[in-house]
Image (cartoon, rainbow, N blue to C red):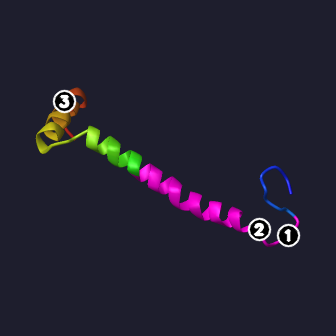
Amino acid sequence: MNSTCVSLTTTKQPDHIIFMIRFLFAAIPIAGLAFSLLALARFPLTQERMAEIRAALEARRGKV
């Protein structure tokens, strides 16, 4: 066993390794979702604001 506690010689990994793999497969997407929801809450886009942004972009590069 090396410093990561993952056995490279057996086919059965310790239970805590299996738990951590499952935990990280769930925790990382949940953390990303939480971060994106916080970012979305701090950057509110209303219909009026989106129209202002589109008008500014169209003025800069022409109508799409």
Q: Residue at x 33, y 48 (%)?
A: 37
In front: 45, or 58? 45
Residue at 79% across, 59% down: 6
Residue 23: % across, % down:
57, 61
Between residue 16 and residue 42, name the one nearer to us.
Answer: 16
Q: Determine which residue is flagged by label 1.
A: 10
- Judge the density around disc 2: few (<14), some (14-19), many (≥20) Cα neighbours within 10 Å: few
**Lateral position of residue 3 relative to residue 45, left or right:** right
Residue 2 image point, x, y percent? 85, 53
The CA span between labels 1 and 2 is 7 Å
Count of number-bearing discs = 3
Q: Which residues are magenta?
A: 9-33
Magenta residue check for 21: yes
Q: Residue furthest top?
A: 60
Q: Main secondary structure of the magenta part?
A: helix
Q: Are marks 2 and 3 in contact (CB under 8 Å)?
A: no
Which of the 4 image quarters holds residue 56?
top left
Mark 1 touches mark 2? (CB < 8 Å): yes
Q: Which residue is mark 2?
A: 13
First-in-chain label (1 vs 3): 1
Circle 1 sits in a helix, a strand or a loop, which is it? loop
Residue 40's x, y, as percent? 30, 44
> How much space separates mark 2 and mark 3, taking CA atoms?
57 Å
User: Badge 3 local density, few (<14 within 10 Å), some, or many (20+)?
Assistant: few
- Looking at the image, tell me whether mark 2 or mark 3 is earlier in sequence order: 2
- Whether the magenta-drawn stretch holds residue 32 is answered as yes
Q: Which residue is disc 3 drawn over?
A: 56
Query: Residue 18 placed where, x, y %?
Result: 67, 66
Looking at the rendered structure, the kind of residue marked 1 is: Thr
**In which quarter of the view is residue 11 placed?**
bottom right
- Determine whether 14 is above or below 58 in the image: below
In the displayed image of the protein, which residue is found farthest to the bottom? 12
